[in-house]
Image: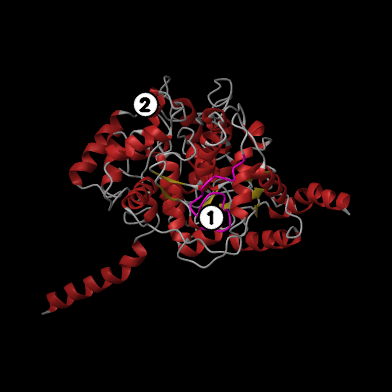
């Protein structure tokens, strides 16, 4: 009797909590949704895509339009891979993890600030799209609030303001932060966050280390009170 | 009088622009309200009207290697009928055996009736965004003119045959399909209410009221670019931001994405009112 009451109570608590436990980053959100309920096959889609992107080189088409193992699963499952599929993704993405040549995952926070603010890079068709003299940015502010002195932010990812102040600069935290920025899908299989490191993505390992420092360093504006507004 | 208006045109982005640029501290609603006031101030003088005037001239002018006008161009309601044509597009055309957008159909008429070289019109030639911003295209002027001839009417696009249904399904598939170097789908940004991207409030294109409001304003005069932008351009810019290749006008994905979104807009009675005015689009 008592057991049953407890069971009912715990289900009731779970049921009430459920609507609040599905924030933006959980499965079942349209932002995470894949291709889902449809009569179209991936082959039909790729045929249409081939006709629609006639100026893409075969290499560009393969790298940018075709899904890799990870996105294929995320699309097929509406962002909700089962245990076996999760395993496939995590193994594949963890095998793609790279670190800077000097082994340092904690770079220069001032450079990291520049990469975080920059929105340049990786766009096809522009003369300076992949100019090696002009390194790519990560456009972190598209989705996150970070340094509150920066005039814009997005809300598609969580706020990273005071990231290092709240978490400290321990080795495991440095490793976690580095890996999250380098390849979010090595940690969360169908994360909404883009993979930034590795072939076909925007950042070098050194840049990811710089961003890691930007987020964690006590001297970085991320972890300091914002300057008084200019007004 | 004319000179005065021109000054308003040049000065207004400076005067109002500083107030309408969004910051993260500001709610999208505040931003919308400020821009609404700007839009009202511009109501009697929309620079996009120049595109419509020029488009009307182009439509009737004898042009191209074959030296004919577009008066025999069938936009779905019979040769040369422009009134209400935009409100019922995209749709299937028997002569091309394709579902086509207004922009695609006009392109086809420029190629097939007038003899223009298709690739010269559609292939991206420019080397920078600034170069493209400064280019006034004949095709966009024509789209702006014909679209304006549906002003006051709501979209009433229908799925009446297998080709249209197939194109719609492809549009839905593409909209929810994650791809590109950023691992994003259209739906990542445009299927959830309340999302903000780098200070910009993102429209939910799966919501009929929003789709109706947004799509009835296109083609729109975009202040940031000082140019008129079509719905094809809007979708292409999103794909480029996803680091996908240039999209071709009237290609399968262009038509499919346009159709998928305009079907939502067609559920509303929001009247087409082009050219709209957009801060950045």
Residue A28 on the magenta segment: no
Q: Magenta stretch? A: B69-87
User: Residue A50, can we see it?
Assistant: yes
Element on which disc 2 rests: loop
Q: Is residue A217 visible?
A: no
Q: Position of residue B71 (x, y in %)?
A: 59, 46
Give the numbered dot on residue B85.
1
The disc placed on residue A123 is none
Q: Is B73 within the magenta?
A: yes
Instruction: Report if the CB atoms under discs 2 and 1 are less than 8 Å apart.
Output: no
Gap in angstroms between the C-alphas marked 2 and 1: 55 Å
Above or below, B280 relative to A210: below
Q: In which image quadrant can residue B115 be found? A: top right
Label 1: few (<14), some (14–19) or many (≥20) C-alpha neighbours in 10 Å: many
Residue in the picture at 48% in, 60% down: B265
Q: Quadrant of the N terminus of chain B?
A: bottom right
Chain letter of mark 2 equals A
Residue under mark 1: which chain is it in?
B
B151 or A51, which lies in front? B151
Direction bottom: furthest residue: A1
* Residue shown at 73% from the left, 60% from the top: B43
Q: Which residue is denoted by mark 2 in the rendering?
A: A98
Residue B52: x and y in percent read: 68, 49
């Amino acid at each position: 009797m008592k057991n049953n009451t407890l069971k009912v109570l715990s289900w009731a608590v779970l049921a009430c909590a459920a609507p609040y436990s599905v924030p933006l980053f959980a499965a079942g959100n349209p932002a995470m949704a894949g291709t889902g309920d449809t009569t179209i096959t991936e082959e039909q889609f790729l045929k249409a895509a081939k006709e629609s992107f006639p100026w893409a080189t075969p290499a560009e088409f393969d790298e940018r339009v075709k899904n890799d193992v990870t996105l294929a699963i995320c699309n097929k499952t509406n962002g909700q891979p089962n245990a076996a599929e999760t395993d496939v993704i995590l193994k594949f993405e963890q095998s793609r993890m790279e670190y800077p040549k000097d082994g340092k995952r904690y770079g220069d926070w001032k450079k990291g600030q520049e990469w975080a603010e920059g929105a340049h890079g990786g766009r096809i068709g522009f003369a300076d799209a992949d100019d090696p003299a002009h390194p790519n940015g990560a456009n972190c502010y598209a989705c996150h609030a970070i340094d509150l002195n920066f005039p814009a932010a997005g809300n598609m990812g969580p706020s990273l303001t005071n990231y290092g102040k709240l978490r400290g600069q321990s080795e495991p935290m440095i490793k976690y932060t580095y890996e999250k920025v380098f390849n979010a899908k090595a940690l969360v299989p169908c994360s909404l966050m883009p993979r930034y490191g590795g072939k076909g993505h925007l950042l070098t390992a050194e840049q990811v280390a710089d961003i890691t420092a930007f987020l964690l360093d006590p001297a970085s504006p991320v972890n300091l009170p914002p300057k008084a507004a200019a007004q | 009088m004319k000179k005065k208006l021109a000054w308003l045109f040049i000065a207004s982005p400076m005067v109002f622009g500083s107030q309408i640029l969004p910051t993260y501290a500001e709610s999208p609603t505040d931003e919308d309200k400020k821009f609404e006031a700007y839009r009202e101030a511009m109501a009697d003088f929309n620079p996009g009207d120049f595109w419509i005037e020029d488009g009307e001239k182009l439509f009737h002018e004898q042009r191209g290697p074959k030296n004919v006008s577009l008066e025999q161009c069938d936009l779905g309601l019979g040769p040369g009928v422009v009134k209400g044509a935009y409100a019922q597009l995209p749709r299937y055309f028997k002569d091309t055996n394709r579902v086509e957008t207004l922009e695609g159909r006009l392109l086809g008429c420029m190629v097939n009736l007038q003899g223009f070289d298709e690739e010269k019109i559609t292939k991206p030639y420019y080397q920078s965004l600034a170069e493209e911003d400064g280019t006034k295209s004949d095709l966009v002027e024509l789209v702006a003119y014909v679209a304006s001839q549906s002003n006051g009417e709501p979209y009433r696009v229908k799925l009446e045959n297998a080709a249209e249904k197939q194109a719609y399904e492809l549009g839905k598939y593409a909209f929810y399909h994650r791809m590109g170097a950023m691992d994003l789908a259209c739906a990542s940004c445009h299927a959830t209410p309340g999302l903000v991207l780098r200070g910009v409030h993102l429209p939910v294109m799966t919501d009929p009221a929003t789709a109706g409001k947004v799509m009835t304003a296109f083609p729109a005069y975009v202040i940031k670019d000082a140019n008129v932008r079509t719905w094809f351009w809007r979708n292409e810019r999103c794909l480029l931001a996803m680091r996908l290749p240039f999209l071709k006008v009237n290609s399968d994905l262009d038509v499919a994405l346009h159709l998928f979104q305009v079907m939502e807009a067609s559920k509303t009675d929001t009247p087409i009112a082009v050219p709209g005015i957009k801060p950045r689009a």
